[in-house]
Amino acid sequence: MTRLMQLTLGIVTAIGGFVDIGNLVTSGIAGARFGMSLTWAIVLGTIGMTVFAEMAGRVSAVAGRAVFHAVRERLGVRTALINMVSSTVLNLLTLAAELGGVSLVLQLATGVNYLIWVPIVGLFCWLVVWRLPFSLLENVFGLLGLALIVFVVALFRLHPDWHGLWHGASHPSVAAGEGIPTYFFYAVSVFGACLVPYQVQFFSSGGREEHWNEKSIPDMRMNAIIGFPLGGLLSIAIMAVAVPVLQPLHVDVAHLGQVTLPVAQAAGVAGLAFVLLGFFAATFAAAAECTLATGYLISQYFGWSWGKSHRPAQAPRFHLVCIACVIAATGFILTTVDPITVTLVSVVLGAAAVPLTYFPVLMVANDRDYMGRHVNRAFSNTLGSVFLLLMLITSVATLPLLFITKAGL
Amino acid sequence: MLAGCVSPAINADGYRGKVSQSAKKMVGLVNAARLAAQLDLDGKMLHTITDNVVTDAEKDAQSVLSSLDSVQPPDESSIKLRSNADDVLQQAASQLADLRIAVRRRDQPSMRSTLGDLGKTLADVQHVQDVT
Amino acid sequence: MTRTMWANRDLLDRLLIAADGEHVGMVDDLELSDGPAPEITALLSGPTALGPRVGGRLGSWWLAVGRRLRPADDPYPNRVPFAQVTTINHRGIAVAVESAEVPTRRLRGWVHDKVIDRIPGSG
């Protein structure tokens, strides 16, 4: 493969990898209820994700280890344990949301109830983790996830009032009939959906799976700096198509099917086929990545051999953790809890737990012992610190918002 | 989505707000179902997605109804309000069920006529929302 | 060039890397010699070393699990003699032993034999 192609592939997979069930659901809800007025939350979340993914990727390339490998060394055995356990619980919730999301997409495509699909999806998720080579997982699903570009196409075909959309995005205000806490609850959920911790954990350990070294830094940087913002743009497009179609009809988005309606109106059956493919790829890849991220996290805390470059027999405990995660998340969704509710709760709790993942990244990226001359520069540190502060504020505000708004009602 | 959890309204104003909220939700549900069915008639929908959207709307309409019914109307005027609103919302919910049946049977003429009925009911539901 | 080592910073909670590059555990505790000027004699690893350091109920539970996995309920953790350490750097602590011979891997062996090896396609 030529270098250019490799670079393009990396960027494309970053776009596909950015969007998951959290973005699909929260963007759809936000667009239908609040118009473009929550665009800022996607923009902020995307910048945060980009800055921290670049840092985590750099740590992975230079220090030769994933960020969480260093967490226990730097935070101590107990703090790291608390971090590891909370991150695991959150990842399980996210995994459940993704598995439920895949199953809902299959229900949309086939008409067969999603609960029938849940165990099958769980099984396939595990099979991918068990056998599919790492690069195939990233590339195949990243490429298929690109089908979501149909939302951008749909936006143009809807001939929206561009000026109105831009005005809504640049002059955020709370829509009539909505409370300020509700507005901020959805701001947190949109922000959290962009920053889901498993993505940074996966990006950082994935760098080890792909044997990044100092020479890979420019490519990794391009992937993050171009790919993630384009992924954020997709999230904005999903939000924007809802504005001319669903908002005037006062549709309160609570189902995945409703998110597809604007595309049907703009691009018909062909458009819907792309939507379903894109939804499937994005949520399925996210499920596999979330499973791997949890396996990485736990293995790295205990110093077990981990990763897909090992055969399962060479990393048995890592694979046992992955199996256990998939079983637990599948079981949880099978209790018939609404997957969309699980998604909302997971992105909001994720927003609260974001500092757990992002603080260690900032800390290790600043450690000269690990990073040598690739230690964080002032630019990354300023941005990183500002975002960490923002994340801490979000984190503190999340639970009160959750209770005041009764989860956004 | 979490429409099942409601707290009892305290006074007449609260009750009116609750009725208005329910009507507002119903407007969104009816609209989503109508949009899906209309797009389906225009040949722009995958049948399974139409079915999903309409079925979801019907289910959610039922839960809007039962959540409204679970609130005790505090006074005479609230009871009057309730009986009026309830009729309209019931009608919307039952027409959504009609639409779901027509969609599943792929019965286009009856989809069209139900869409017409839903359009009229929608005006009533909006009226309930505005008056209260 | 000599550099002062801090057991706390440079040894504890570091990754143990075997001669073949495998990750074989974390340094969960240290073994010191008796006497007025104690010296580090071995790196300790495994649940029975980690449990007491985590402390609390979780720590004792972890310790109990570790004991079960040890032959004859021997609570003494797995040790890697300090003399076998070859390098200490930001990647971890490299030891001059093949991964198969590092005595830290009983849980790994158990999981491998009882679970993973029984699933098709593990090899």
Image (cartoon, coloured by chain):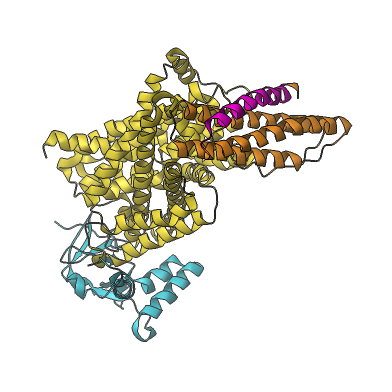
Chain colours: A yellow, B orange, C cyan
Residue farthest along the top direction in this orientation = A163
Residue B110 location, quadrant: top right
What x and y, as percent, mark residue A381? 33, 35
What x and y, as percent, mark residue C30? 31, 70
Tell me if residue A116 comes above or below residue A349 in the rendering: below
Front one among C65 and A157: A157
Asked whether B122 falls inside the magenta stretch, the response is: yes
Front one among A304 and A406: A406
Which quadrant of the figure contains the N terminus of chain B? Answer: top right
State whether residue A189 appears in this view.
no
Asked whether C26 falls inside the magenta stretch, the response is: no
Which quadrant of the figure contains the C terminus of chain B? Answer: top right
What x and y, as percent, mark residue B15? 78, 33
Front one among C82 and B87: B87
Q: Residue at x 28, y 62 (%)?
A: C11
Q: Residue at x 24, y 66 (%)?
A: A314
* Left or right of B67 in this view: A193: left
Q: How many marks?
A: 0
Residue B62 location, quadrant: top right
Tell me if residue A238 comes above or below residue A397 in the rendering: above
Tell me which segment is drawn in magenta.
B106-130
Front one among A112 and A115: A112
* Left or right of A217 in this view: A388: right
Does the magenta stretch mainly form a helix, a strand or a loop?
A: helix
* Left or right of B125 in this view: C87: left
State whether residue B95 appears in this view.
yes
What x and y, as percent, mark residue B59? 61, 42
